[in-house]
Image: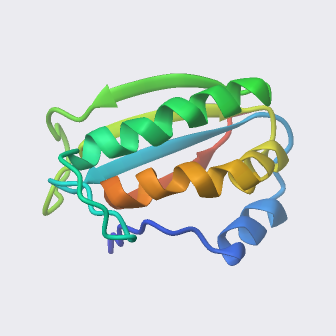
Amino acid sequence: MKVLNKVQRTAEDFEALLDLAIEGPVTMVHLLKFKARAAYADGRETELTGAEAYGLYRRKMVERVTSAGGRLVLSGIAKHLVLGEVEELWDEVLVVEFPSKETFVEVISSPEIAEWGVHRRAGLAGQLLIATTAQD
């Protein structure tokens, strides 16, 4: 299995999700890898770690998700890979539930996300984002 950590989402990523036959709640599983030190695109100096910079984004994002009817299900530090093998373990796992895939795209596309997103991009070395639904 090939694994490609990415930081930026594309319009095609959103379109592919919206094209899926998913009705009702969607739960997004985030596997996050942080930079040792935050690196802002505008070159600002900072003493923040990547995890700390991402934390600035996460706090605002959880408020936004909650206001849209979603909820943070889990925020946990990855400690040990029990089964399988990867070159490098992710640093954190986030699980966030949204009322629908449309709500997810609406929240992620919000104008204020661009403002907070600078912290996300400064802190993340990579991410996997998996859309899940409850089994029937």
For residue 89, say whether it is visible: yes
Estimate the x, y position of residue 7 in percent, counting from the top left: 43, 65
How is colour applied across the structure in the image? rainbow
**Residue 31 as seen in the image, left or right of residue 49:** right
Say if 52 sits above or below 3 in the image. Answer: above
- Residue positioned 39% across, 58% down in the render: 127
Estimate the x, y position of residue 122 in percent, counting from the top left: 35, 59
Find residue 60 and report its image quarter: top right
- Residue positioned 17% across, 47% down in the render: 47
Find residue 85 and report its image quarter: bottom left
Say if 42 sits above or below 84 in the image. Answer: below
- Residue positioned 38% across, 48% down in the render: 31
- Residue positioned 69% across, 33% down in the render: 64
**Residue 57 as seen in the image, left or right of residue 37:** right
For residue 130, say whether it is visible: no
Say if 91 sits above or below 127 in the image. Answer: above
Estimate the x, y position of residue 16 in percent, counting from the top left: 73, 70
For the N terminus, which image quadrant? bottom left
Q: Residue 58 or 23: which is nearer the viewer?
A: 58
For the C terminus, which image quadrant? top right
**Residue 63 as seen in the image, left or right of residue 87:** right
